[in-house]
Image: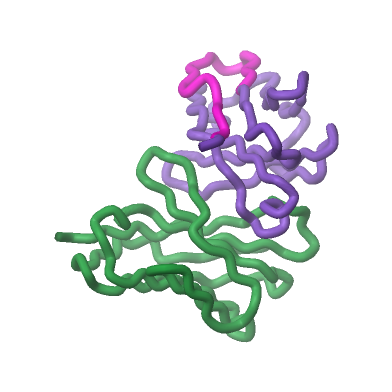
Chain colours: A purple, B green
Amino acid sequence: EPEVTQTPSHQVTQMGQEVILRCVPISNHLYFYWYRQILGQKVEFLVSFYNNEISEKSEIFDDQFSVERPDGSNFTLKIRSTKLEDSAMYFCASSDEVGARTGELFFGEGSRLTVL
Amino acid sequence: QKEVEQNSGPLSVPEGAIASLNCTYSDRGSQSFFWYRQYSGKSPELIMFIYSNGDKEDGRFTAQLNKASQYVSLLIRDSQPSDSATYLCAGRATTDSWGKLQFGAGTQVVVTP
């Protein structure tokens, strides 16, 4: 069964360092998303991406964050200068057009980011 | 501020019984609602979506929506130990882009044999 894959599964970094989280969405999906979940808190929307541009971003997604689809398969989230409060599980998700409309997002298993 | 509120639980349910989960939302612009299941340490997985007032059934799951009361619920019939998970309610406003979901904090369900 097709799945969204994310790497790394866990990354530990020092405050102020740059981090890149990688995702391979399901191959025929065209809508891509990043969500995050701070431990014990809600799953929060960060950004949606379609047709090589950001569709919408939340207030969390400030200038420290960026997304990129560098090739036909990868979708990345970059955090330029990590802060302690960036520690969270970051979920990549993808959907086809029907899924985007119906809310059926396929989530990856997540990348846990720990900022020390 | 758009808020989706859920009772965090845990909701303890005997095997074979009905689990009833509730969710309220503050944004009257929310038109679409979703129930996701999240096993501990895993990613969310869509169970059902509902757009219209009333009930929607899918197997052992029934979602109910009451837009006037800004209330969404999920019933799980014949609960099984494998249903033990956190259930996330999510909403989406018509003004939001596709795929932008507002999640609640989730209700933990524990099905006891």
Residue A72 to residue B35: above or below:
above
Q: Is residue B81 above or below residue A112?
A: below
Regarding residue A102, the answer to whether it shows in the image is yes
Residue extending furthest toward the left: B113
x, y (%) of residue A99? 67, 52
Quadrant containing the N terminus of chain B is bottom right
Task: Please state which of residues A19 and B86 is positioned toward the viewer in this rendering.
Answer: B86
> Residue at point 35% right, 53% down?
B85
**Left or right: B9 in relation to B87:** left
Q: Position of residue A45 (x, y in %)?
A: 64, 46
- Which residue corresponds to the image point at 57% horizontal and 62% vertical from the top-left? B34
* Residue range corresponding to the magenta coloring: A3-21
Is residue B100 at least partly visible in the picture? no
Q: Quadrant of the C terminus of chain B?
A: bottom left
Q: Image quarter for residue A36?
A: top right
Q: Image check: A2 left or right of A59?
A: left
Count of numbered tags: 0
Q: Is A15 in front, or is B47? A: B47
Query: Which one is in front, B80 or B43?
Result: B80
Residue B68 located within the stretch drawn in magenta: no
Residue A14 magenta-highlighted: yes
The quadrant where residue A51 appears = top right
Residue A5 location (% of width, % of height)? 55, 28
Q: Residue at x 75, y 35 (%)?
A: A62
In the displayed orientation, state which residue is furthest to the front. A1
Estimate the x, y position of residue B24 in percent, counting from the top left.
53, 72
| Rendered residue at 28%/70% (across/down) | B78
Seen in the image, is A41 located left or right of residue A86? Answer: left
